[in-house]
Amino acid sequence: MLTVENLFVNYGMIKALQGISLVVKEKEIVALIGNNGAGKTTTLKTISGLIKPTSGRIYFQNIDLIKLNPYQITKLGIIHIPEGRKPFANLTVYENLRLGAYFVNKKREIEERLSFVFQIFPRLKERLKQPAGTLSGGELQMLAIGRGLMAKPKLLLLDEPSMGLSPILVEEIFSVIKNINKEGTAILLIEQNAAKALSIAHRAYVLETGKIMLEGKAEELINNESVKKIYLGVG
Amino acid sequence: MNYFFQQLLNGFQLGSVYALISLGYTMIYGIIRLINFAHGDIFMLGAYFGFYAITRFKFNFFIAILFSMVLCMIINVLIEKIAYAPLRKKNVPRINLLITAIGVSFFLENFASLKIIFGPDYLPYPRPFKIITFDFLGLTLSSIQIIVFFITLVLLLILDYLIKRTKIGLAMRAVSYDKETALLMGINVDNIISLTFALGAALAGAGGVLYGICYPQIHPFMGIMPGLKAFVAAVLGGIGVISGAVLGSYIIGMIEVFTAAFISSTFRDAIAFAILIIVLLTRPQGLFGKEEGIKL
């Protein structure tokens, strides 16, 4: 579904990505784990078109993404839910959700998608008319995911969904992610919380200073000695 | 007492013209954080387009306003694409954009002064309709004032509807808050920025024609003072805040007219800029602005 080949990204003199290759297949959850500054967010931003790579190729369902603008990539069904939730705090919850389905014009379609999002996050329905700036951290993460779902994503790029949430909320968000995937959406997930990410992912890549160090099935990586040591804090 | 209310009407008239200019300042600042110092010159171009529409092409007054608005939109979008967009894409510091805007301003003023364009002379503005005066509760209200109030009101209502009730308006508010996330929503941010320049220019163009019929003399440098006053109004209201720009404009219009009427007309410009200094010293975010303050 998504193929990334030999991706290089520079920020001025800094080499952020040094030849990343990865694949996300249909209906898969793929986790990207690694320390701060390993290049996880850069990888996602390059896939969604916010950053242009110096070299490398990205294909989504055989469409070359490199030449496309971010808004065109969004239209293809690749939805990037950014780090820090990035709500439009000046807009209401409804307006935020409406923007998620920006290129949908049919009222019925928008209503249907809204009720789908409310099924998953009933809390958002209660807050509909409130400015997004007044929501709590957990509600903001729900809004960020709900806004992403409004676009009916084929591939969801999730950047640190558990960041700053209480353990109960982390559980809730991860079970939602699992359910979204069960409905057929492929997910590329970035997490600091590697144990959590590996528990729901099918496969995973371990990123270190812009390179992929390890890749494999999630259950294999959980038991890998060096992964245990560095990312899971065991051993 | 009558004199007082009469001045109130005059202040309202001047404030309306300022509001039409000031909105463009505040919207463009809102969307790309640029104080567009060439905006007063778009207003000047609008006045000239209206002038030619009425005198040369014999357009009906309302058609002339529309004609001027459309031409100003096209020109401002071209300016954005040629002068600002390439800089924006290079992520240059904002001061570079500001200096570019000043350059665009000088260019427009001097280009308009060329003999083959508009020429450097003062031109008397045509009065495309009969000036009738009404006595209204002991006040004199002219048909010019009624038309200025009416057109300003209609344009403000259209703008308000556009920004608050349409998808495009929603996209504009999203882009002004966070461009990167707006892109992720599938919004073509460049188009929304162009649209904002177009909207601001349309209002300034209409303002130019209305200014022409109120204060019937135009010249290529006529945009400087009203442009600066409208900028003061936008800062007073809180730059980036749309309702603030409108209110700020009426306040500045009133203060200016009352200064001229009750103190001395030589102070009318000084007082507007004194307000700018006071606002920046005491409440830099303006009356309705958020705490972030003004960043050039």
Image (spheres, coloured by chain):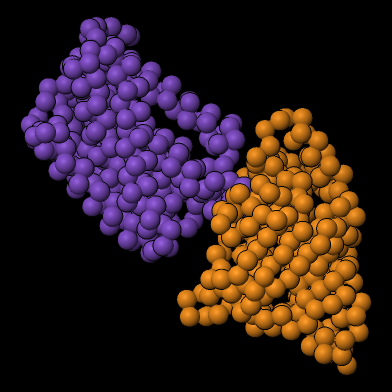
Can the viewer see residue A188 in this picture?
Answer: yes
Q: Quadrant of the N terminus of chain A?
A: bottom right
Q: Position of residue B157 (x, y in %)?
A: 48, 25
Toward which corner of the image does residue B6 lie, by quadrant?
top left
Q: Residue at x 71, y 30 (%)?
A: A106
Residue B281's place in the image compared with B124, above or below, is below
B20 left or right of B57? right
B228 left or right of A35? left
Q: Residue at x 8, y 34 (%)?
A: B115
Residue B5 versus residue B10: which sits nearer the camera? Answer: B10
Q: Position of residue A64 (x, y in %)?
A: 63, 57
Q: Position of residue B181 (x, y in %)?
A: 60, 54
Q: Residue at x 66, y 54 (%)?
A: A63
Residue A229's place in the image compared with B270, above or below, is below
Q: How many marks?
A: 0
Toward which corner of the image does residue A51 lie, by quadrant?
bottom right
Residue B227 versus residue A115: which sits nearer the camera? Answer: A115
Question: Farthest front residue?
Answer: A62
Can the viewer see residue A140 in this picture?
Answer: no
Q: Residue at x 35, y 22 (%)?
A: B66
B118 left or right of A177? left
B95 left or right of B159? left
Q: Colour of chain A?
A: orange
Q: Position of residue A36 (x, y in %)?
A: 67, 79
Question: Farthest bottom residue?
Answer: A235
Q: Quadrant of the C terminus of chain A?
A: bottom right
Give the chain ID for the purple colour.
B
